[in-house]
Image: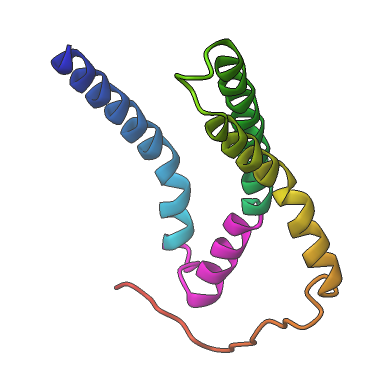
Amino acid sequence: MFKKTKTSYYKLGAAMTVGMLAAAPQTAEAAAAGGNNFNSIANNVNDSISSLPGLISALAYLFGVLLAVLGIMKIKDHVENPSQTPIKEGAIRLLAGGCLFALPIILEAMYETAGAGAGASTAKLKAVEFTIN
C-alpha cells in the first residue's frame, strides 16, 4: 500500500513539474526582455501577496466550520456515553471553531481601525538593476 501511495506522489510531482514548465516560457521571455530588475521583482511579490488575505479568510472559515461540526459530534458522543467521552473535548473544539470562524471579521475590524494602512508607506528606490549576463 505504501508503494502505491509513493508512486501516486511521483505522478503528482511529475504532473506539477510539467505544468510549471508549460508556464515557464512567459517568465523566460520577460527576463530576456530586461524585466529582471529589483523593481519588477518587488512588484511581482506584491502582486502575489495581494490575494493572501482572501486565502487566509477562506481557510479560517473552512476550518472553523469543520471544528464546530467535530465539536458537536463530540458532544453527541458525550451525551450517548458520558463515561467514555468527556464534554471538554467537544467544548474545546467548539471554542476553537468559533475563534477561527470569527478571525476574518476581527482582522477586518483591526485593519479598518488602523486606518486602512494609513500609517504605512512604501519606500521608493530608483536606478537599482540586477542583470544576468
**Image location (x, y in percent) of residue 112:** 85, 66
Q: Nearer the viewer, residue 97 or 62?
A: 97
**Image location (x, y in percent) of residue 98:** 70, 41
Q: Which residues are magenta?
A: 32-50
The reply, left or right, for residue 1 in relation to residue 38 is left
Residue at 42% across, 61% down = 32
**Can you say whether 59 is above or below 90 in the image?**
below
Residue at 48% across, 63% down = 33
**Count of labels shown?**
0
Point out the residue furthest to the left here: 3
Tell me, yes or no, whether the highlighted magenta stretch contains residue 33: yes
Q: Which color scheme does this rendered protein use?
A: rainbow
> Which SS does the magenta portion mostly show?
helix
**Can you say whether 56 is above or below 38 in the image?**
above
Q: In which quarter of the view is residue 110 placed?
A: bottom right
Tell me, yes or no, whether the highlighted magenta stretch contains residue 129: no
Point out the residue furthest to the front here: 83
Q: In which quarter of the view is residue 67 placed?
A: top right
**Can you say whether 104 is above or below 7 in the image?**
below
Image quarter where the C terminus lies is bottom left
**Image location (x, y in percent) of residue 23:** 44, 40
Q: Nearer the viewer, residue 15 or 6?
A: 6
The reply, left or right, for residue 126 in relation to residue 102 is left
Q: Nearer the viewer, residue 107 or 129?
A: 107
**Image location (x, y in percent) of residue 76:** 61, 16
Image quarter where the N terminus lies is top left
